[in-house]
């Protein structure tokens, strides 16, 4: 029968395993690749915010026009 670990031992094992995973098994991107991906994310975020702005502006104009008609 397996002995049940206490919460402190479980947490310690988790931290050790996470550290081992991050240092030995994760393939980190190169500096150049990280910079390129950062530019991709920033560009996508900017374009997505422009899209949200446009949709918001269209809804605002449509609702303003609609409320002027029903008054």
Image: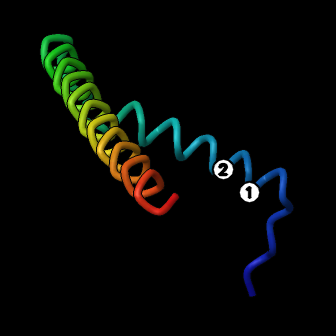
Label 1 neighbour load within 10 Å: few <14, some 14-19, many 20+ = few
Separation (CA) of disc 2 from disc 1: 5 Å
Q: Residue furthest front?
A: 71
Q: Is residue 8 or residue 52 the one in the foreground?
A: 52
Label 2 neighbour load within 10 Å: few <14, some 14-19, many 20+ = few
Q: Which residue was labeled with disc 2? A: 13
Dividing the picture into quarters, in which one does residue 29 lie? top left
Q: Is residue 54 or residue 14 the one in the foreground?
A: 54
Q: Is residue 37 or residue 11 the one in the foreground?
A: 37
At x 52% / y 36%, what residue is drawn? 19
Q: Position of residue 49 (x, y in %)?
A: 31, 32
Q: Is residue 47 or residue 19 the one in the foreground?
A: 47
Q: Which residue was labeled with disc 1? A: 10
- In the rendered structure, the answer to whether residue 56 lies left or right of residue 16 reads left
Q: Position of residue 36 (x, y in %)?
A: 14, 18
Compared to residue 57, the image places residue 62 above or below, namely below
Q: Position of residue 15 (x, y in %)?
A: 63, 42
- Say what secondary structure mark 1 lies in: helix
At x 26% / y 25%, what residue is drawn? 46
Q: Position of residue 30 (x, y in %)?
A: 17, 18
At x 72% / y 45%, what residue is drawn? 12
Disc 2 + disc 1, Cβ < 8 Å? yes
At x 54% / y 46%, what residue is drawn? 17
- Say what secondary structure mark 2 lies in: helix
């Amino acid at each position: 029968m397996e002995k049940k670990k206490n919460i402190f031992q479980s947490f310690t094992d988790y931290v050790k395993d996470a550290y081992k995973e991050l240092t030995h098994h994760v393939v980190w991107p190169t500096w150049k690749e990280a910079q390129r991906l950062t530019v991709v994310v920033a560009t996508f975020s900017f374009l997505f915010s422009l899209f949200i702005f446009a949709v918001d502006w269209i809804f605002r104009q449509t609702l303003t026009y609609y409320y002027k008609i029903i008054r």
